[in-house]
Image: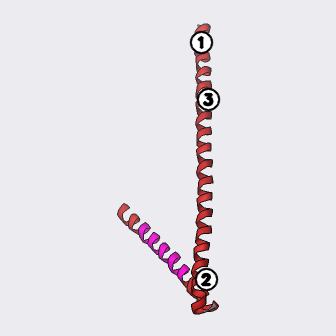
């Protein structure tokens, strides 16, 4: 009877060992994938910021000879507000529609 109990306990310990190894492998995979996603998002976000800065600078530089410094800066600033405000409005509208359809 004791021999049988020892076998059961040994089998249980071996099962725990195998499951802990699977858990460790899954955790490593998850952390690696998460790190790759975060690094990719940072690179893409940085590229988007630099590209947007150059786009706005070129827009400002194109308007500068025609309007002068104050009016060119005002035009670029207002266009930024318009784009960000429009995007925010669209996102909020989409969220409200989603909430209304879920209810």
Asked whether residue 36 is in view, the answer is: yes
From this view, report whether residue 36 is shown above or below residue 67: above
Give the image quarter of residue 70: bottom right
- Residue at x 59% of width, y 57% of height: 41
Read off the magenta span: 79-95
Earlier along the polypeptide chain: callout 1 or callout 2? 1
Main secondary structure of the magenta stretch: helix
Observer-side mark, 1 or 2, equals 2
Dot label at residue 78 = none
Observer-side mark, 1 or 3, equals 3
Earlier along the polypeptide chain: callout 1 or callout 3? 1
Q: Secondary structure at mark 1?
A: helix
Label 2 – label 3 distance at C-alpha: 60 Å
Q: Give whichever of 3, 58 is nearer the camera.
A: 58
Residue position marked by numbered label 1 in the rendering = 7
Q: Position of residue 11 (x, y in %)?
A: 58, 17
Residue position marked by numbered label 2 in the rendering = 61
Quadrant holding the C terminus: bottom left
Q: Position of residue 62 (x, y in %)?
A: 57, 83
Q: Is there a contact, CB below 8 Å, between mark 1 and mark 3?
A: no
* Magenta stretch contains residue 26: no
Q: Secondary structure at mark 3?
A: helix
Label 1 – label 2 distance at C-alpha: 80 Å
- Residue at x 58% of width, y 28% of height: 19
Dot label at residue 21 = 3
Quadrant holding the N terminus: top right
Q: Give whichever of 85, 63 is nearer the camera.
A: 63
Earlier along the polypeptide chain: callout 2 or callout 3? 3
Q: Give whichever of 99, 4 is nearer the camera.
A: 99
Q: Is there a contact, CB below 8 Å, between mark 2 and mark 3?
A: no
Q: Secondary structure at mark 2?
A: helix
């Amino acid at each position: 009877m004791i021999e049988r109990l020892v076998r059961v306990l040994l089998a249980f310990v071996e099962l725990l060992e195998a499951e802990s190894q699977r858990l460790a492998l899954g955790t490593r995979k998850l952390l690696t994938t998460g790190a790759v996603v975060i690094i990719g998002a940072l690179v893409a976000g940085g590229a988007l910021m630099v590209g947007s800065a150059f786009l706005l600078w070129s827009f400002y530089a194109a308007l500068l000879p025609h309007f002068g410094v104050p009016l060119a800066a005002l035009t670029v600033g207002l266009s930024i507000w318009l784009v960000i405000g429009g995007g925010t409005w669209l996102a909020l509208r989409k969220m409200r529609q989603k909430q209304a359809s879920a209810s």
